[in-house]
């Protein structure tokens, strides 16, 4: 068994209905093609590539086939003393690649206190108990779109005026009250905004299926005729969502939640108890290691509307405020840091031109590194560390880097892009 602090790992590809098909360029299937025992099917949806120790899809050591979680338990020095003391003898994060063909559910992740309560009351549904807070961050690999957080109430009020189907679903009295409080001439307090968002979102998500389906049908007909008054982005989204989830209440979230669009390298951080739904694109996602998610729309899975509507913070902001601003990382020249306001993880993006090398000082915790782009082809990138070095053979190759280990990445033949998730206590 290799005792190197840096070693390649084998990750698992997950197939879900919302994933991109292999033939349509799913990053997940592209990255998984070089893995042992991976069988590619161009017509199969490849949704997620999991890198970490989560029991639902644990990574293994390429050299030995040993379970990564068990290996780390036997070598806690790879996690680092501070990380073990704070998080225990396991990775506190799960790193993923997501390839999204159609919308994921309208959802939110519970904070620690609520997650523990849900786990104790419904352990068969809400399984996570160690890392109970489920914040997550997404960095775009391709153009990406998603619902992220609530729109400002004034925008929602304008939709209640211009989209009668939306007003009908929430109820005319609720719509009238909301418009009077948050119309263009009002100046509500933050607490009033939060209360108003809860008052509009709750009846929307609890609306009777028959009513929702009738109003969606009316709205889609107007959109298809081109007389809905909505802009092109909103109109196209409504048609797409209705095609994938006919008559679903989540379609009306177009008027309640921000539509955030990212270019490659841009990122959003999704706090606990904040509503969101990924819509389209390929992303790197990092999240706390847990199973906790509460869903209420755009999904065939279990919906828990009462929990979702009661748990949200109901804060609002424009789409621009959802996008994270990366910063330089320590002494590096070609690496940016995405550092969300949590302890469980941060993510690095290294972007090298031909001939450039990035040297990293030791990180006081474990990390997982994936090479996502090799413009020069096989073996045009090289990873070096204290006890060895390795030519990178393909896009999607993944390595574990132990705590306290200095590494360097060299581009020799074309552009090289790599993402690295890490934790320091």
Image: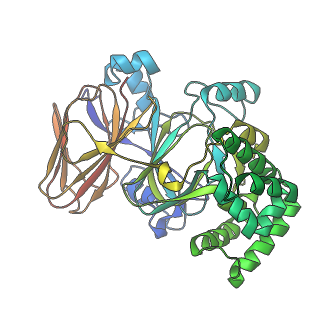
User: In the figure, is residue 119 to the left or right of 81?
Assistant: right
Image quadrant occupied by the N terminus = top left
Q: Could you tell me residue 126's position as x and y percent?
A: 68, 33
User: In the figure, is residue 2 to the left or right of 389?
Assistant: right
Furthest-left residue in this view: 355
Q: Could you tell me residue 228's position as x and y percent?
A: 70, 77
Q: Observer-nearest residue: 325 or 33? A: 325
**Would residue 177 be visible to someone looking at this image?**
yes
Which residue sits at x=66%, y=69%?
Answer: 238
User: In the figure, is residue 73 to the left or right of 78?
Assistant: right
Q: How is the image coloured?
A: rainbow
**Would residue 302 be visible to someone looking at this image?**
no
Q: Observer-nearest residue: 88 or 279? A: 279
In this view, 226 is above or below 16: below
Which residue sits at x=56%, y=54%?
Answer: 15
Q: Observer-nearest residue: 55 or 214? A: 214
Image quadrant occupied by the C terminus = top left
In this view, 55 is above or below 230: above
Indicate the quadrant where residue 11 lies. Answer: top left
Q: Observer-nearest residue: 48 or 164? A: 164
Q: How many marks?
A: 0
Q: Could you tell me residue 33's position as x and y percent?
A: 39, 57
Which residue sits at x=51%, y=41%?
Answer: 136
User: In the figure, is residue 120 to the left or right of 13?
Assistant: right
Furthest-bottom residue in this view: 225
Q: Could you tell me residue 44's position as x and y percent?
A: 55, 63
């Amino acid at each position: 068994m290799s005792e190197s602090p840096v070693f390649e790992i084998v990750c698992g590809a997950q197939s879900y209905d919302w994933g991109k098909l292999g033939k349509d360029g799913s990053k997940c299937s592209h990255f998984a093609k070089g893995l042992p025992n991976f069988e590619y099917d161009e017509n199969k949806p490849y949704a997620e590539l999991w890198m970490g120790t989560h029991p639902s899809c644990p990574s293994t050591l390429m050299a030995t086939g040993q379970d990564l979680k068990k290996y780390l338990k036997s070598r806690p020095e790879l996690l680092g003393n501070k990380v073990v003391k704070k998080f225990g003898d396991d990775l506190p994060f799960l790193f993923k690649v997501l390839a999204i063909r159609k919308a994921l559910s309208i959802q939110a992740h519970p904070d620690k206190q609520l997650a523990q309560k849900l786990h104790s009351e419904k352990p068969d549904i809400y399984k996570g108990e160690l890392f109970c807070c489920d914040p997550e961050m997404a960095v775009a690999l391709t153009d990406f779109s998603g619902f992220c957080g609530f729109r400002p109430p004034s925008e929602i009020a304008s939709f209640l005026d211009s989209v009668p189907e939306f007003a009908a679903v929430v109820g005319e009295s609720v719509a009238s009250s909301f418009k009077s409080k948050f119309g263009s001439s009002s100046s509500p307090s933050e607490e009033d905004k939060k209360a108003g968002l809860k008052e509009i979102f709750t009846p929307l998500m609890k609306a009777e299926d028959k009513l929702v389906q009738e109003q969606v049908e009316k709205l889609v007909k107007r959109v298809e005729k081109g007389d809905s008054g909505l802009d092109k982005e909103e109109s196209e989204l409504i048609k797409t969502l209705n095609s994938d989830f006919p008559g679903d209440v989540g379609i009306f979230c177009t008027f309640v939640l921000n539509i955030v669009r990212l270019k490659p390298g841009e990122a959003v951080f999704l706090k606990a108890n904040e509503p969101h739904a990924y819509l389209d694109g390929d992303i790197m996602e990092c999240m706390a290691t847990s199973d906790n998610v509460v869903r209420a729309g755009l999904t065939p899975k279990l919906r828990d509307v009462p929990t979702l509507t009661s748990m949200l913070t109901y804060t609002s902001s424009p789409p621009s405020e959802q996008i994270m601003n990366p910063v330089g990382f320590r002494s590096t020249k070609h690496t940016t840091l995405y550092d969300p306001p949590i302890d469980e993880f941060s993510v690095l993006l290294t972007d090298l031109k031909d001939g450039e090398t990035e040297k990293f000082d030791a990180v006081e915790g474990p990390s997982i590194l994936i090479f996502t782009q090799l413009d020069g082809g096989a073996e045009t990138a090289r990873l070096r560390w204290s006890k060895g070095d390795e030519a990178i053979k393909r896009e999607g190759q993944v390595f574990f880097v132990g705590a306290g280990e200095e590494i360097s990445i060299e581009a020799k033949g074309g552009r090289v892009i790599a993402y690295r998730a890490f934790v320091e206590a």
